[in-house]
Image: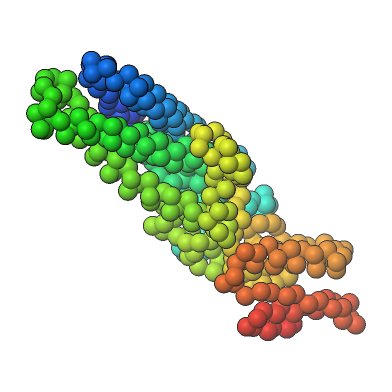
């Protein structure tokens, strides 16, 4: 590791140190200057207990979620997505870009990698620095020098990538930071007004109370905007990167390609099924960060654009013997399960019915019918 890299890593902690210093100062200004030095002499014991108790509740949740966002390890790709030395030689031996993409497609079939998304040119998503095929929703972070599962963005305020492993913690960090700042601003507001109306002495402690109100109000406004953005992303099952550049499937770019059909289902993918854990920075989300359900349009295109074979990114090609030995019932069940899953909860997607029948020559004829399209083979 070079000197420049060490300096960059040290500099990356400056925003975290700044936030920590602001929180420590706000603790002193609120607990000591406001509660002890201002409220206690006024014999406002009940108000004093109320202020300190709820303040520490918000502070603990804020610090807990902030800590988890910072120190949770980023989601890294499984080893099967990395090219082995022999696979890398096959890839680098090809000179033309089209041939290299064919090699990546063959490797993906051989390993049966669960990849649906493409580049804008239609090829496999490949990371040159990592020498790996990118999983769906994964992106390379130049700061972390690795590909991050379901990468949302690299946040300097937590000195970490926000992605699959810590996105819930990040949203809770925004929530509790907002509640913390709003609580401080609301409870300090009466004394801020008294400061400007000269009803309290303008000493050093009073100035700290005034600045505490102004800083908490400024942070509240900025955090509110950021929190609203990420709540919208949660309900749409999108990342920040996907909101700016939609993922590309076989049917083209689709910003709703990973949506589970409703805001409730999208929320539960990140926060889990148990409501009692939703507001706690604990791992409760669904999935492994690699495989994601996709919308009907991509599933149908994977199955029907290339008839007689499975998706070219999900599995390898079937040989002639496998096709003849597979039972017709198994084929029918496979096709039906794909259609039923793809159209589930999607009212805007036409319903699909698969009709199959045996012909006299031993082949299987099938037809795909929708409420707007009829096609037979």
**Residue 250 found in image quarter:** bottom right
Q: Position of residue 134 (x, y in %)?
A: 53, 49
Where 164 sits versus 250, above or below?
Answer: above
> Residue 77 occupies which quadrant of the picture?
top right
Q: Nearer the viewer, residue 230 or 280?
A: 280
**Quadrant position of the N terminus in the picture:** top left
Q: How is the image coloured?
A: rainbow
Residue 197 horizontal/vertical position (percent): 10, 32
Which residue is more in the foreground, 161 or 370?
A: 370
Residue drawn 57% across the image and 72% down it: 348
Is 77 displayed left or right of 193 in the figure? Answer: right
| Quarter in which the C terminus is drawn | bottom right
Residue 176 lies, with reference to residue 295, above or below; the image says above
Q: Position of residue 144 (x, y in %)?
A: 42, 36
In this picture, is 253 found above or below 103?
Answer: below
- The image quarter in which residue 287 lies: top right
Q: Position of residue 360 (x, y in %)?
A: 90, 82
* Left or right of 376 on screen, residue 7: left
Q: Look at 50% across and 61% down and name the residue there.
A: 256
Q: Is residue 97 visible?
A: no
Q: Nearer the viewer, residue 282 or 94?
A: 282
Q: Residue at x 25, y 31 (%)?
A: 188
* Residue visible at 44% across and 41% down in the picture: 171
The answer to whether one can see residue 73 in this image is yes
Looking at the picture, tell me which residue is in the foreground, 245 or 182.
Answer: 182
């Amino acid at each position: 590791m070079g000197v420049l890299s060490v300096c960059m890593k040290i500099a990356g902690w400056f925003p975290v140190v700044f936030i920590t210093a602001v929180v420590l100062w706000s603790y002193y200004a609120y607990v000591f200057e406001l509660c002890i030095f201002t409220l206690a002499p006024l014999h406002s014991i009940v108000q004093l207990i109320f202020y300190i108790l709820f303040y520490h509740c918000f502070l603990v949740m804020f610090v807990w979620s902030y800590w988890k966002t910072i120190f949770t390890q980023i989601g890294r790709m499984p080893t099967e997505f990395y090219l082995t030395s022999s696979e890398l030689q096959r890839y680098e031996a090809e000179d033309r870009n089209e041939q290299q993409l064919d090699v990546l497609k063959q490797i993906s079939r051989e390993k049966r990698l669960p990849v649906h998304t493409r580049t804008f040119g239609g090829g496999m998503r490949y990371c040159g620095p990592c020498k790996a095929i990118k999983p769906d929703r994964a992106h390379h972070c130049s700061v972390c020098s690795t590909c991050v599962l379901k990468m949302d963005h690299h946040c300097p305020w937590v000195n970490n990538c926000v992605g699959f492993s810590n996105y819930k913690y990040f949203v809770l960090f925004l929530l509790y930071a907002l509640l913390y700042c709003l609580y401080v601003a609301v409870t300090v507001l009466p004394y801020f007004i008294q400061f400007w109306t000269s009803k309290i002495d303008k000493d050093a402690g009073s100035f700290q109370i005034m600045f505490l109100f102004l800083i908490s109000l400024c942070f509240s406004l900025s955090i509110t905007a950021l929190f609203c953005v990420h709540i919208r992303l949660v309900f749409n099952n999108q990342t920040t990167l996907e909101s700016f550049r939609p993922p590309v499937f076989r049917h083209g770019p689709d910003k709703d390609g990973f949506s589970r059909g409703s805001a409730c289902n999208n929320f539960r993918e990140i926060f889990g099924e148990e409501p009692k854990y939703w507001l706690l920075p604990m791992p409760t989300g669904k999935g492994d960060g690699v495989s994601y359900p996709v919308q009907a349009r991509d599933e149908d295109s994977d199955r029907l654009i290339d008839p007689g074979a499975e998706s070219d990114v999900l599995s390898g090609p079937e040989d002639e013997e496998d096709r003849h030995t597979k039972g017709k019932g198994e084929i029918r069940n496979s096709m039906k399960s794909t259609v039923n899953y793809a159209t589930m909860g999607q009212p805007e997607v036409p319903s699909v019915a698969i009709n199959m029948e045996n012909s006299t020559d031993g082949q299987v004829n099938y037809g795909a019918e929708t409420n707007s399209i009829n096609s037979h083979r």
